[in-house]
Amino acid sequence: MLAAIVLSSLANALIAVVARAIGAPDDFQPLDPGSYIFLTTVGVVAGALGWAAVRKLSGDPEKLIRWLAPVVVAVSFVPDFFLFGPGGATGVVALLLMHVAVAALAVTAYRKVMPLS
């Protein structure tokens, strides 16, 4: 799980740097390392807990994860849409990309550490 947090934080750092370089506001706090590293850690840990619950409780965890993971990522987008004012389109798109990057890296790690079958 630590590897997923570190790799996700590095991916998010790259996304934040690119977003700022192409016009995201410098004062848009969600693109500050303190914000996204903390939230990345929370997301990866929460995802691991959810993954473990699915493994334990589901009769067909692979089938459940196949639809549940994308739904959770889509729901995680909702708060970001409220940041269009302060973050502009560039800042918000960067946040959405961060969610996808974290999910992709975390799911890869969960599959290795906590296989579903």
Image: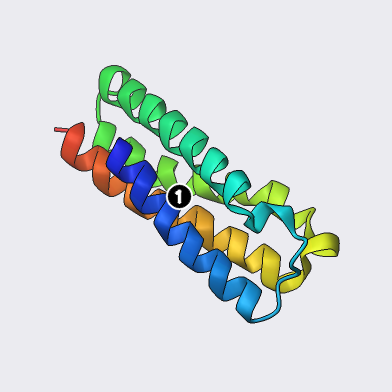
Q: Residue placed farthest to the bottom in the image?
A: 22
Q: Residue at x 60, y 45 (%)?
A: 34
Q: Is residue 48 above or below residue 21?
A: above
Which quarter shows the N terminus? top left
Which quarter shows the C terminus? top left
Q: Nearer the viewer, residue 84 or 68?
A: 84
Q: Quadrant of residue 84?
A: bottom right
Q: Position of residue 93 (x, y in %)?
A: 63, 67
Q: Is residue 115 visible?
A: no
Q: Residue at x 64, y 58 (%)?
A: 31
Q: Nearer the viewer, residue 114 or 13?
A: 13
Q: Is residue 65 left or right of residue 89?
A: left
Q: Position of residue 98 (x, y in %)?
A: 52, 58
Q: Residue at x 28, y 43 (%)?
A: 3
Q: Residue at x 49, y 60 (%)?
A: 13
Q: Quadrant of residue 110?
A: top left
Q: Is residue 98 left or right of residue 62?
A: right
Residue that mark 1 sits on: 70
- Judged from the image, the secondary structure of the residue bearing numbered disc 1 is helix
Q: Position of residue 36 (x, y in %)?
A: 57, 48
| Category of crowding for the residue at label 1, using alpha-carbon neighbours closer than 10 angstroms: few (below 14), some (14–19), many (at least 20) | few
Give the tally of numbered discs.
1
Q: Position of residue 4 (x, y in %)?
A: 33, 44
